[in-house]
């Protein structure tokens, strides 16, 4: 797998997110209160809202546009809503973060 | 002919007696009460929640002043009776009032026991008995220094927990080896000690006080073993003694208490005694249930029913400390003729012990899980033979008869004569039949009609279950809407507890108020963040990760993920320089849409997030600050041109609008707050559909509020008329602060006003000068922290990470 370094975990606020720009669109990289890191497409399955701008709670994010709640672990919409975003593998080497770009490229092809 | 009834004392027992008497024989007596305390009858059991801040005094009043007037009862507050003249049949108070009686009731209660050690008279040594003591403790707690509670019984532990929750460093001294040894066995006492210590309260058992040390005021305690413990407050809670001095001086028969027969009559045929001062069948009582029983008997006797008599029954004990559940009943000492069943679950902190004799329960101690207390009490009272269910008895009622029942079914299965409310001796049948007969639908109604759960409140859950069983779907126990699924508490409770417990961070709120999720959700976090910003403006560090994106990046997110930017234009007034700067920004950043808003501002739409700081930098150079068009806070103050230009204008509405906006910008409120000032009643600024509006008139300024022109359409209500601009500003600011402190997050001012009541708001803002000034001052204080332009902060580099991608990857590879 082709791991691409995207930066250090400290650059993401606790219970927050940052964006990574890729040729296939933005990836939202989240850091939870428990220091877990997740990466998903920055695109809500509902109306395309930027999930990276939402409020992070537990291992989920609430979309800023219409309050869909998306699981960071599975990319699935939680609650009564149905839909999913792609999750992207993340590696955390003592704080240095990598995403698997390969899976992105393949998905784009 | 009406007889004269005089009552000495106005505690819970005589209060209850009067209720019964008024029901049975409303016109028999002309009643006069002498109360040594300068107040009405209140619920003494609830002093601990007042101390801890979970309730306030108004909430624990049983009979307000109106009740005495309605029943034509004369109440002398702050009058202590100093003499009873039995020959003349009169009593005399310390203020010299003499009243004659046909029947006299002595209900002087008890006095706290003061241990006879040197230093007991020092300033800072208090007892825990009445509201004055609670107020003294609250005052002392403001110092947040060290306190010692002498006595590890019910009252002492409640006092300790209350003081600790008020921020004091508390040590409990207890003379016995384990806490509450009269109600708990050593195992439960140990669990209790652990729970108390987990609250940061130190416990020293086997502690004998030798002396209280200090010079004029308390400095600490010396124990028998030589240890010295420093403290500035000492609360003695080692027990009570019946207050019998007055009866003794009058020559009535006394022993430990005033000796009465089963009908509550003393050795004088015209004098009764009841409550903690009375001794019946050789026993004195301190818990409320037997005292209420005395009240019932005394009322019946006074009404002429000479057959009524007092019967002893064991009363369960419960501790009123939030989060500690314990229940104790009957006799639980070991003995050769006794057997016991014990269940321990260390990880859950549960301990249950049943003491049996001849296959019947004679004693129960429950710790950590007390729901089955009522059931065990019922089995004990009826002396039910438990041999059939012995194997599963300890697991509780739900486990009887095979598969576990749900709690609702367990309550449904209770017999009609099972006691639900121990304080008031109310059984299940009485509650369900009253609900049906009177058509009761709310808990307050049930409390009013049956007294169930109206005293200590620990049976509230059971009563609510009975209501849903009786009423079915017609009963909505969650009448208080929880904030979100993370908690059972509603917004008002959370706001109250934040203040009462001094909670100053979101994790502290979630920990102390037992949030069900680890870090909340998108509903509760912004609400909590607002409450903390509002309540602790100088101490709380705003948590941006708990703010909605608009407030986090100070712009309004649009459907395509771009943002809109609205600079502040004071009162809607602008000039060529400002407009030119806006035009330049629009060109430079190729802003696709420029729009005039309803609040007399200019909105720049379609700006990319990365460009926001640069846009703000250019706008800032022209003197603009954020218009906070995204905030749950002060938005705009719309104005008309007023007396400067308009031929109808009566006042300088533009000037006042600008002044208000400059004073109030930056403040956060529960929901958005839009204002307007119109220069005359023609109302061109449309002030009468705003959150707060001003209509200028010749004689001054008419202040309006609680309008709406969104989801709901509603004209404003008039707050009142003031004469000067200064007054207008002060009233508007005070009103805003009142709303800030009481509003629920996202509750617009018109909804808040409907909930609180317009008259109450007018009273606090227009009539009560002190309240208004205090609100005003608190707003001004808060503004010293709030009036920072968020745009210039971000131009200077704050929250840089918000506006930049973390990385840009893959483009190189893609190009290859």
Image: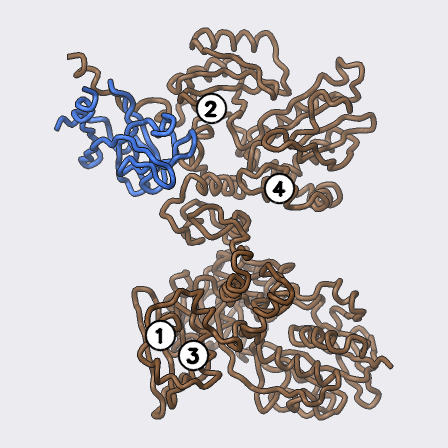
Chain colours: A blue, B brown
The residue singled out by tag 3 in the image is B181
Please state which of the two labelled residues, at mark 4 or mark 3, is closer to the viewer: 4
In the depicted structure, whether residue B743 falls above or below residue B587:
below
Q: Quadrant of residue B660?
A: top right
Give the letter of the chain under mark 3.
B
Gap in angstroms between the C-alphas marked 2 and 1 = 63 Å
Q: Position of residue B104 (x, y in %)?
A: 76, 83
Q: Which residue is mark 4?
A: B752
Tag in front: 2 or 4: 4
On residue B555, the disc is 2
Assess disc 1: are there few (<14), some (14-19) or many (≥20) residues with their C-alpha within 10 Å of its C-alpha: few
**Tag nearer the camera, 1 or 4:** 1
User: Is the residue at mark 2 from the same chain as the one at mark 3?
Assistant: yes
Q: Report whether B705 appears left or right of B83.
A: left
Specify whether disc 1 shares its chain with disc 3: yes
Q: On what subunit does the disc labeled 2 rest?
A: B
What residue did someone put label 1 on? B401
Label 1 – label 3 distance at C-alpha:
35 Å
Helix, strand or loop at mark 2: loop
Q: Quadrant of the C terminus of chain B?
A: top left
Host chain of mark 1: B
Residue B517 visible? The answer is yes
């Amino acid at each position: 797998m082709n791991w691409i370094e995207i930066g250090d975990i400290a650059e993401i606020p606790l219970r927050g997110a940052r964006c990574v720009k890729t040729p296939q669109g933005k990836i939202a990289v989240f850091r939870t209160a428990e220091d877990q890191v997740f990466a998903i497409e920055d695109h809500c399955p509902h109306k395309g809202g930027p999930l990276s701008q939402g409020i992070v709670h537990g291992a989920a994010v609430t979309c800023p546009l219409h309050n869909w709640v998306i699981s960071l672990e599975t990319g699935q919409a939680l609650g009564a809503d149905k839909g999913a975003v792609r999750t992207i593998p993340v590696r955390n080497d003592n704080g240095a973060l990598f995403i698997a770009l390969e899976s992105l490229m393949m998905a784009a092809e | 002919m009406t007889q004269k009834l005089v009552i000495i004392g106005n505690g819970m027992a005589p209060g209850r007696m009067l209720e019964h008497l008024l029901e049975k024989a409303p016109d028999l007596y002309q009643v006069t009460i002498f109360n040594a305390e300068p107040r009405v009858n209140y619920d003494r059991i609830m002093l601990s929640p007042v101390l801890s801040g979970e309730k306030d005094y108004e909430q624990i009043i049983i009979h307000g002043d109106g009740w005495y007037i309605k029943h034509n009862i004369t109440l002398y507050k702050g009058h202590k009776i100093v003499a009873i003249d039995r020959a003349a049949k009169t009593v005399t108070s310390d203020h010299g009032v003499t009243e004659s009686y046909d029947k006299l009731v002595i209900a002087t209660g008890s006095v706290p026991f003061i241990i006879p050690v040197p230093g007991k008279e020092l300033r800072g040594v208090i007892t825990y008995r009445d509201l004055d003591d609670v107020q003294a403790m609250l005052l002392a707690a403001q110092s947040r220094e060290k306190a010692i509670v002498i006595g590890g019984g019910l009252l002492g532990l409640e006092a300790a927990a209350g003081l600790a929750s008020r921020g004091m460093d508390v040590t409990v001294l207890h003379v016995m080896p384990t806490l509450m040894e009269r109600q708990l066995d050593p195992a439960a006492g140990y669990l209790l000690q652990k729970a108390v210590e987990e609250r940061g309260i130190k416990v020293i058992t086997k502690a004998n006080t030798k002396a209280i040390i200090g010079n004029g005021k308390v400095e600490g305690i010396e124990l028998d073993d030589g240890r010295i413990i420093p403290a500035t407050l000492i609360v003695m809670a080692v027990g009570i003694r019946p207050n019998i001095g007055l009866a003794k001086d009058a020559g009535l028969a006394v022993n430990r208490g005033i000796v009465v027969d089963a009908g509550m009559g003393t050795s004088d045929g015209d004098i009764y005694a009841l409550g903690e001062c009375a001794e019946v069948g050789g026993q004195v009582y301190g818990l409320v249930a037997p005292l209420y029983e005395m009240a019932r008997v005394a009322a019946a006797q006074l009404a002429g029913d000479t057959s009524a008599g007092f019967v002893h029954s064991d009363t369960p004990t419960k501790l009123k400390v939030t989060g500690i559940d314990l229940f104790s009943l009957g006799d639980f000492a070991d003995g050769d003729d006794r057997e016991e069943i014990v269940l321990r679950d260390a990880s859950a902190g549960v301990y249950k012990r049943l003491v049996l004799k001849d296959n019947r329960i004679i004693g129960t101690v429950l710790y950590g899980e007390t729901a089955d207390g009522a059931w065990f009490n019922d089995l004990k009272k009826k002396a039910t033979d438990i041999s059939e269910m012995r194997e599963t008895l300890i697991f509780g009622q739900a486990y009887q008869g095979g598969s576990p029942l749900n709690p609702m079914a367990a309550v449904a299965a209770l017999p009609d004569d099972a006691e639900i409310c121990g304080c008031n001796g109310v059984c299940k049948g009485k509650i369900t039949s009253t609900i049906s007969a009177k058509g009761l639908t709310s808990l307050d109604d049930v409390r009013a009609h049956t007294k169930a759960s109206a005293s200590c409140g620990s049976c509230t859950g059971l009563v609510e279950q009975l209501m849903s069983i009786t009423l079915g779907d017609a009963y909505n126990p969650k009448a208080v809407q929880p904030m979100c699924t993370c908690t059972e508490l509603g917004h008002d409770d959370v706001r109250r507890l934040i203040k009462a417990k001094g909670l100053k961070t979101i994790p502290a709120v979630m920990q102390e108020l037992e949030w069900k999720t680890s870090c909340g959700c998108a509903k509760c976090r912004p609400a909590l963040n607002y409450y903390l910003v509002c309540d602790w403006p100088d101490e709380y560090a705003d948590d941006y990760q708990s703010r909605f994106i608009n407030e986090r990046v100070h712009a309004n997110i649009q459907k395509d993920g771009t943002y809109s930017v609205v600079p502040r234009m004071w009162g809607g007034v602008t000039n060529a320089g400002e407009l030119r700067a806006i035009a330049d920004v629009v060109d430079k950043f190729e802003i696709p849409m420029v729009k005039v808003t309803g609040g007399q501002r200019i909105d720049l739409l379609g700006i990319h997030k990365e460009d926001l700081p640069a846009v703000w930098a250019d706008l800032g150079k022209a003197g603009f600050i954020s218009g906070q068009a995204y905030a749950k806070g002060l938005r705009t103050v719309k104005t008309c041109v007023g007396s400067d230009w308009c031929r109808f204008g009566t006042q300088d509405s533009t000037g006042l609008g600008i002044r208000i906006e400059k004073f109030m910008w930056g403040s956060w409120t529960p929901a958005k707050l839009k204002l307007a000032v119109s220069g005359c009643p023609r109302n061109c600024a449309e002030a009468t559909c705003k959150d707060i509006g001003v209509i200028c008139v010749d004689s001054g300024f008419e202040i309006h509020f609680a309008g709406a022109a969104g989801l709901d359409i509603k004209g404003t209500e008039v707050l009142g008329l003031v004469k000067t601009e200064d007054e207008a500003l002060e009233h508007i600011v005070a009103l805003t602060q009142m709303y800030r402190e009481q509003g629920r997050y996202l509750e617009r001012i018109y909804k808040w006003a409907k909930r609180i009541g317009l008259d109450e708001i007018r009273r606090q803002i227009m009539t009560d000068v002190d309240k208004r000034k205090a609100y005003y001052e608190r707003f001004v204080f808060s503004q010293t922290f709030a009036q920072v332009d968020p745009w210039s902060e971000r131009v200077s580099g704050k929250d840089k990470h918000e506006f930049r991608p973390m990385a840009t990857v893959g483009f190189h590879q893609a190009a290859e």
